[in-house]
Image: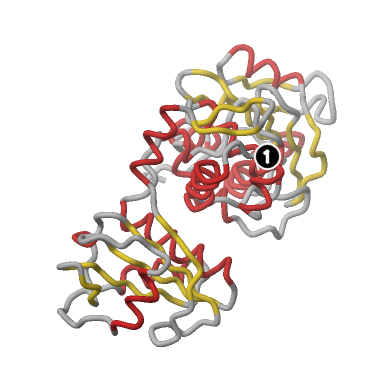
Amino acid sequence: MKNALLCCVTFFRLDALYIHMAYRKTSHLGGPVPKFGDYHVWKTLYCIAKYSPLGRKSLAAHLKIGEGSTRTILNMLQDDGVVAINKNGVILTKAGLDIWKTVKMDLHAVRIPELTIGKCDCAVRVPGMAGNIKFGCEERDVAIKNGAMGATTLICSNNMLIFPGSYYPVDQKIENRLRDHLDIMDGDAVIIGTASDDDRAELGAVTAALETMGGLRIRRELDDLLTYRSTGSELLSLAFAIHDLVGGLPVCAKSRDNLGIRIEEGKVIDNAYTGAVLEEVINAGTTVRKTAMSGPYKGIRVIVTPIELDNKVIAAIGVVDIRSMAGVNNLIRLKSDDE
C-alpha cells in the first residue's frame, strides 16, 4: 500500500465514516461537529409530517441539535427528493410521504414506574414489529448505548400486551395507560425508553425502535454527512481521522461550494480555508502531488485527493508533508504485510 491518504479516501466509503463523524469527541478546537444520527433524521420526518409546513428554526427547536446540523439534514433530504422547501417552510414530497409510511412510529411521553427505572419514560409503538422482538434485552442495550437508562419492550399478541419470550401479560392498568396514548394493534411492538430526562428517554426508545425496524432505509446518501455544500465543521471529523492516520501531519479539506479547514498539531487553525491545490483537485477530479506554489505551505510538498459521491467530486482533502523539508522522502506510507 503506497499512500495512506490515498488508500484511506479511495477505499473508505463515506457511509462507513458515519458513526465516527457524528459522535467524535469534541476535544479538538475549531467549531462544532455535527451531532446527529438516524434518530434525528427520523425525528425530522416525524416533525414535518406532524407540523408541516415547518420552518427550519422551529424544526431545529424540535430536534434540539442546532440550525447548522438541521440544515445539513434538510439538504440531504432535499437532494434525495424527500422534502421540499418553500416560503412557507418544509414539507414532505410524495416520495417523502411514501418513505414516512415505511418508518412511521407513534411516540408519547408516559410514566410507567412499575416497569421502568428512570424519572422519565417515552413509549414508542413500532407497527407490525412484534415478530422481530426476541427477549427485549436487545432493545434495552441499544437504548443504553444511546444515553437512556434502559428500555422495556412489550409485544401485542392476540390483542393483548405481553412480555416477549413469554405469555406473561402486562397488568391491565398499565396496558390501559399505554393504549390511552398509542393506537396499539395486534402484531405491534411497544418500546418504553427510560432516562433521567424526556429527551434521553425518547432518544433511547426511538433508536431501539429503528434498530428493530432495520434502520432508516432511505438511501445510502442519507448516511453520509458530506455533500458538495459541506462546511468546514462538517468535514472536521474526516480531516482529524486523516490527521491521526498520517502521524499528525497538517491536513486541509474543503467541499466544492464552501470554505474548509486547516488542521495542525491536533487543532483547527483556520476554519475558513481554501488553497490552490485543493481547488485544482476539485476541478480536475484527480489526485495531485506537487509542491505548493502559494499560501501558508508554499514550497512544501502536498498530496491532495478528491472525495467523490455518485461519480461527482464533492470535496477535496490533502496532507502537507512538512517533514519533506528535512529531506526525507516517501513519509506518507502504510507498511505492507511483508515489511
Three-letter amino acid code at the position of disc 1: Arg
For residue 222, side relative to residue 99 (left or right): right
Query: What percent of the width, then of the height, locates residue 179?
Result: 35, 69
Query: What percent of the width, then of the height, locates residue 206?
Result: 44, 60
Quadrant the N terminus occupies: top left
One can see residue 190 in this view: yes
For residue 217, side relative to residue 81 (left or right): left
Residue lying farthest to the top in this orientation: 284
Residue at the spot 60% in from the left edge and 36% down from the top edge: 53
Q: Quadrant of residue 228?
A: top right
Depicted 321 relative to depicted 277: above or below: below
Residue at the spot 37% in from the left edge and 34% down from the top edge: 98
Q: Secondary structure at mark 1?
A: helix
Q: Nearer the viewer, residue 37 or 23?
A: 37
One can see residue 318 in this view: no
Q: Residues within 10 Å of mark 1 (few under 14, many from 20)?
A: some
Query: What percent of the width, then of the height, locates residue 85?
Result: 61, 28
Total labels: the figure holds 1
Q: Which residue is mark 1?
A: 56
Depicted 168 relative to depicted 327: above or below: below
Depicted 32 relative to depicted 299: above or below: below
Residue at the spot 48% in from the left edge and 78% down from the top edge: 111
